[in-house]
């Protein structure tokens, strides 16, 4: 059962990740709106007789359709799949681990008589699986964020990674091996929240639908439960996702202090510069991506389980 759960979860995750990659890229670009290419610029400072006054920058916000169209116009349709190799590696490392571990814990902690598990144990299993999976997959996650964000930088500042392996190799050489785990605390926290809310809520919604005989155990149930789970996961994880994206994408020049000293500093500067709702930047593409991703993930997973049931 152990290895099988990892394989099933990995296949479903890779298919879901690749099919929704353009939406994820648009989400990343939106989360970086309002931030300069090197540092966050919350205000303009003016000195007047020793006193300093500030004026907030009014940076125009562009919606997901506008961001998508801008990417296509400036970088071409292929740019919507920038960093897809990192997505494949990330899903292979992160999602395979989290899905497999959750499956192992689910079977270990489920009631032997009816096969169900209390919601509290589902959440605990999700937190454990998500945290371990994120730690394993963080290097690919950093590479993916950078590759997705590269097109928004001026040409002379672009990193121009040719692949996820090229990105990881250059980060290792130029910034040290620790750079591969930049933002790892955020990645782990986000993954714990996503996995706990996504997997636990899917199982809970599915059991509720079947228990109340609203639908049979088929495609309709899987789609309904997975979309509801995707919405829950998006609401819970978006604030952490915004901070994670900004910390991972920041440029740290040799001899210079980083734009953010850490996750909390990034969060405080973001709120100060752009308001608390900035933590929900990219929420529309997040739910637009999280919904389809979760639907594809669980529908594919259910089908893969049927194919592998005799193994």
Image (cartoon, rainbow, N blue to C red):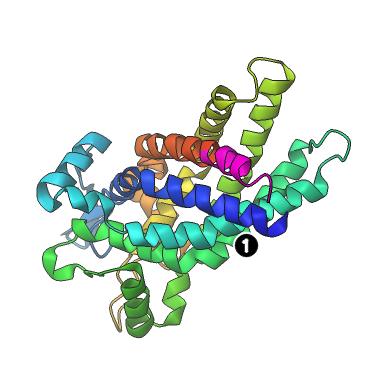
Say which of 283 and 103 sits in front: 103
Say which of 285 and 311 sits in front: 311
**Does residue 227 appear to the left or right of 269 in the view shown?**
right
Question: Which residue is at a point 28% across and 77% down the rendered structure image?
Answer: 253
x%, y% of residue 9?
Answer: 58, 50
Question: Which residue is at a point 32% across and 79% down the rendered structure image?
Answer: 170
Relative vertical location of residue 202 with respect to residue 258 in this rendering, above or below: above
**Does residue 14 appear to the left or right of 116 in the view shown?**
left
Question: Which residue is at a point 34% across and 45% down the rendered structure image?
Answer: 27
Q: Residue furthest right?
A: 113
Residue 153 seen by the camera: yes
* Count of residue discs: 1
Relative vertical location of residue 173 with respect to residue 143 in this rendering, above or below: below
Which residues are the magenta region?
300-311
Question: Which residue is at a point 19% across and 61% down the rendered structure image?
Answer: 153
x%, y% of residue 30?
Answer: 29, 45
x%, y% of residue 55?
Answer: 21, 48
Q: Residues within 10 Å of mark 1 (few under 14, many from 20)?
A: some
Q: Which residue is mark 1?
A: 132
Relative vertical location of residue 210 with respect to residue 297 in this rendering, above or below: above
**Does residue 8 appear to the left or right of 143 in the view shown?**
right
Q: State whether the magenta stretch is mostly helix, strand or loop.
A: helix
As helix, strand or loop, the secondary structure at mark 1 comes to helix
């Amino acid at each position: 059962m152990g290895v099988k759960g990892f394989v099933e979860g990995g296949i479903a995750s890779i298919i879901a990740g690749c099919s929704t990659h353009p939406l994820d890229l648009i989400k990343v670009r939106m989360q970086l709106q309002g931030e300069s290419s090197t540092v966050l610029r919350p205000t303009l400072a003016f000195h007047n007789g020793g006193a300093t006054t500030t004026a907030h920058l009014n940076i125009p916000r562009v919606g997901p359709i506008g961001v998508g169209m801008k990417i296509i116009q400036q970088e071409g349709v292929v740019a919507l799949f920038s960093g897809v190799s990192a997505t494949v590696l990330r899903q292979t490392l992160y999602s395979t681990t989290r899905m497999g571990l959750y499956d192992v814990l689910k079977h270990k902690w489920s009631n032997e008589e009816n096969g169900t598990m209390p919601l509290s144990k589902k959440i605990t299993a999700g937190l454990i699986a998500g945290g371990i999976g994120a730690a394993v997959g963080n290097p690919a996650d950093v590479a993916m964020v950078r590759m997705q964000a590269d097109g928004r930088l001026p040409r002379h500042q672009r990193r121009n990674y040719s692949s996820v392996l090229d990105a990881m190799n250059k980060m290792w050489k130029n910034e040290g091996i620790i750079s591969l785990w930049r933002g790892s605390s955020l990645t782990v926290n986000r993954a714990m929240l996503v996995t706990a809310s996504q997997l636990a809520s899917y199982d809970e919604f599915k059991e509720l639908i079947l228990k109340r005989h609203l639908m049979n155990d088929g495609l309709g149930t899987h789609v309904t439960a997975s979309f509801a789970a995707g919405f829950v996961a998006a609401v819970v994880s978006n604030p952490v996702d915004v901070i994670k994206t900004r910390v991972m994408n920041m440029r740290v020049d040799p001899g210079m202090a980083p734009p953010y000293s850490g996750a909390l500093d990034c969060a405080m500067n973001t709120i100060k510069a752009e308001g608390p709702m900035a933590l929900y930047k990219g929420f529309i593409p997040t739910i637009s991506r999280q919904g389809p991703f979760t639907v594809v993930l669980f529908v594919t997973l259910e089908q893969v389980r049927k194919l592998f049931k005799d193994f």
